[in-house]
């Protein structure tokens, strides 16, 4: 039995049966049987289904936001933001899928035509995340469905109610139940799903879990896409507007209670402005209200996962033992619930876990640097490579620095941003493959080469 707990107060809000091995096998068999017919339906029909799903999100926004807040602890305004932000991503997929899938003639001469066409992968195993279940899930299941695949969708056990709502809305919008099936449960359900002959595995989560999935599917010769964690750095140069940079980075570090793979997790500040930047940054974070996530003015909510409270405690203790100073926060909040104070650490270095291991919480380390070269060296001193940013008035300087940084996405004077028009990918332990952009539509297809000679 799956127990759904409200992370703000520890109460159980729902109990659901987990999918059994037999049930998963049945859903896979049904999805495989239904996928071919779904792929054969006109693209216009699949587009209409997703348009109706989009409208259903608008019509049910308040109810869906409340469910999301209740099970992951996301402040209600941020829950609405996620639903509203999803609309633009869906619009991108609706606008670009037909053009992206159109067969392309690359040669036509002497009676011989050469054409590149797209075919769906088949049945997609979509093992998704809890921190942005609508964003992260829809990055996979919307283009997967539009390109003619069936989807077995396992939401995180921490966002199961939201996952079930997504399934209900898609079915009500015209997507057949066997074409999109939700699997409820924890890691055991995900492991069981991987035993089946799916055409692709798309996972979002931690590096440790992604590594286990890669090992479980080794030798299968299927599409494997892993969107994993980050230890995302930003460098603040000495020529910035201090107030603007501090406000932007404080939000980038603390939004969604720091539980974003692209949250700012390390900040390097040029020594000429270090103290002034830190003062402005701390002032910004002090202004973030920590409170019951259902309240309209709450900005910092509880951590979704109780074990992460201990992770943050250990990172703070390690940093303080090695010479860091804590200017703000640094402590868990006594139960009920999974609460941790917004925390700012200075005098940090790369001997400390807070600067090397993913925090995934409302905590940030700020380190002083003497030069651009030192900043680049420290930014690249990581096994991760998801995002990185530079704040400076000089675009040429920013481009020069960011060109040297190993990351899938880079930012100049902004952070913690995802666009449907750009590919979302990582380097190193941040994963393999990509979502979003037209490349993220193509990733749910295999290319077929047609050699056509007229008789």
Image: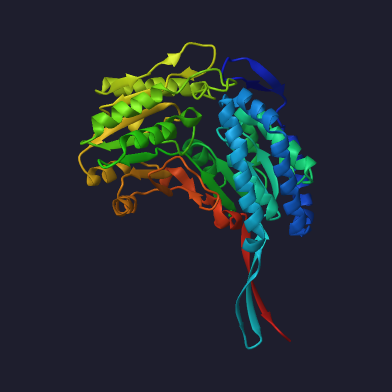
> Percent position (x, y) of residue 365?
33, 30
Q: Nearer the viewer, residue 193 or 7?
A: 7
| Whether residue 182 can be seen here | no
Q: Identify the residue at horizontal 75%, vertical 45% (top origin).
A: 52
Residue 221 appears left or right of 63: left
Corner quadrant of residue 304:
top right
Compared to 403, does 82 lie above or below?
above
Compared to 414, does 423 lie above or below?
below
Q: Quick one: quadrant of the C terminus?
A: bottom right
Corner quadrant of residue 171:
top right
Q: Identify the residue at horizontal 40%, vertical 36% (top origin).
A: 248
Asked which colour scheme the image uses, the reply is rainbow
Compared to 85, does 162 lie above or below?
above
> Percent position (x, y) of residue 181?
73, 40
Q: Nearer the viewer, residue 216 or 161?
A: 161
Residue 449 appears left or right of 49: left
Q: Identify the residue at horizontal 60%, vertical 46% (top origin).
A: 88
How many marks can you see?
0
Q: Identify the residue at horizontal 59%, vertical 46% (top origin).
A: 202
Corner quadrant of residue 442:
bottom right
Q: Quick one: quadrant of the N terminus?
A: top right
| Whether residue 269 can be seen here | yes
Residue extending farthest bottom: 110
Residue 355 appears left or right of 167: left
Q: Nearer the viewer, residue 368 or 23?
A: 368
Compared to 372, does 359 lie above or below?
above
> Percent position (x, y) of residue 259?
49, 31
> Percent position (x, y) of residue 224?
56, 50
């Amino acid at each position: 039995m799956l127990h759904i707990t409200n992370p703000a107060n520890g109460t159980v809000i729902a109990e659901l049966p987990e999918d059994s091995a037999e049930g998963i096998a049945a859903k896979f068999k049904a999805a495989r049987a239904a996928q071919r017919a779904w792929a054969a339906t006109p693209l216009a029909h699949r587009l209409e289904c997703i348009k109706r799903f989009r409208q259903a999100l608008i019509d049910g926004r308040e109810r869906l936001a409340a469910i999301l807040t209740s099970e992951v602890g996301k402040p209600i305004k941020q829950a609405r933001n996620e639903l509203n932000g999803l609309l633009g991503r869906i619009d991108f997929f609706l606008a670009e899928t037909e053009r992206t899938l159109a067969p392309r003639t690359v040669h036509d001469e002497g009676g011989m035509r050469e054409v590149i066409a797209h075919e769906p992968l088949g049945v997609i195993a979509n093992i998704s995340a809890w921190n942005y279940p609508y964003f992260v899930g829809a990055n996979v299941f919307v283009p997967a469905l539009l390109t003619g695949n069936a989807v077995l969708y396992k939401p995180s056990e921490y966002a199961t109610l939201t996952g079930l709502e997504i399934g209900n809305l898609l079915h009500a919008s015209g997507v057949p139940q066997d074409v999109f099936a939700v699997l409820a449960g924890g890691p055991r359900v995900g492991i069981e799903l991987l035993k089946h002959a799916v055409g692709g595995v798309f996972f979002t989560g931690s590096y440790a879990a992604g590594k286990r999935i890669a090992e479980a599917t080794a030798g299968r010769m299927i599409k494997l896409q892993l969107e994993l964690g980050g230890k995302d750095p930003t460098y603040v140069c000495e020529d910035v507007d201090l107030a603007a940079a501090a406000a932007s980075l404080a939000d980038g570090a603390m939004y969604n209670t720091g539980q974003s793979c692209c949250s700012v997790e390390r900040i390097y500040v040029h020594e000429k402005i270090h103290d002034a930047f830190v003062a402005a940054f701390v002032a910004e974070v002090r202004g973030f209200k920590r409170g019951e996530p259902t309240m309209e003015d709450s900005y910092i909510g509880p951590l979704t996962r109780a074990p992460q409270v201990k992770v943050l405690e250990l990172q703070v203790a390690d940093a303080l033992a090695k010479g860091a100073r804590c200017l703000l926060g640094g402590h868990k909040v006594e139960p009920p619930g999974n609460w941790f104070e917004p925390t700012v650490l200075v005098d940090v270095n790369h001997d400390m876990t807070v600067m090397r291991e993913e925090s995934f919480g409302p905590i940030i380390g700020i380190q002083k640097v003497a030069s651009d070269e030192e900043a680049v060296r420290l930014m690249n001193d990581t096994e991760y490579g998801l995002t990185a940013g530079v704040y400076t008035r000089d675009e040429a300087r920013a481009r020069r620095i960011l060109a040297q940084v190993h990351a899938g996405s880079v930012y100049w004077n902004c952070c913690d941003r995802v666009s449907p028009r750009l590919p979302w990918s990582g380097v190193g332990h941040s994963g393999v493959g990509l979502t979003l952009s037209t490349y993220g539509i193509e990733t749910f297809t295999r290319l077929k080469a047609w050699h056509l000679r007229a008789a």
